[in-house]
Image (cartoon, rainbow, N blue to C red):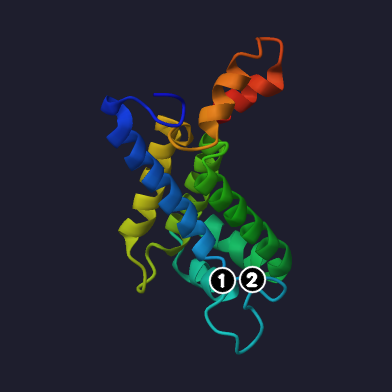
Amino acid sequence: MGKFMPSRSLLFMGLTLAVIRVAMGWLWLSNLSWKLPPTFDCEPGEGDGLCYWMGEMVEYSYLPPHAWFVESVALPHYEVFGYLVVGMELLTGVLLVLGLLTRFAAVLGVFQSANLFIGLSSSPDEWVWSYLMMILLHMVLLATAAGRYFGVDAYLHDRWKSSGREDRPAQIGALST
């Protein structure tokens, strides 16, 4: 049936993976609204922005070195970390929605979700399972190369894979799809 329409036996699996991939991408994109530059909602009186949640990480982190890092390094330099967080979440979201370099995006998602799990899952207003599910869903996307189903990776993977053993960037690209 072609690259963008797998055989009937794989159609449901491919559609399911595509829906999960796009939903996870949309999750990252939709959560950008409360931490936008230039203030990242960190100015006094601005509400529940990035600095509020970083403060929650300081108070509730499972790992004392993680809490120390957030308190001593990230919070005093919230502008730098704000741009890093927004950039990573934007990149992860766009790549997952498009199905472009999906395995790379899934690794980013695992690391970001693990950071949230370590820092926030013991907060009284958070549900521990939400971060574990995010980690597990990103692992599913990583293990199944979900971008090859109804994503740009379906086109790029074979093209990069067939470029030959000497073309290292193409080989790395093929692994990322």
- Seen in the picture, residue 153 relative to 169 is either above or below; the reply is below
Q: Real-space Cα distance between discs 2 and 1?
A: 6 Å
**Residue 164 visible in this rendered orientation of the protein:** yes
Q: Residue furthest front?
A: 1
Residue type at tag 2: Leu
Q: Is residue 81 above or below residue 148?
A: below
Mark 2 is surrounded, within 10 Å at the Cα level, by few (under 14), some (14 to 19) or many (20 or more) other residues, namely some
Where is mark 2, residue-wise?
36
- Residue at image location 37% in from the left, 40% down from the top: 17
Left/right of residue 11 with respect to residue 60 in the rendered view: left
Quadrant of the frame with the N terminus: top left
State the residue at coordinates (67%, 22%). Answer: 170
Q: Residues within 10 Å of mark 1 (few under 14, many from 20)?
A: few
Rendered position, 12 above or below 128? above
Q: Position of residue 148 (x, y in %)?
A: 47, 31
Q: Which residue is mark 1?
A: 33
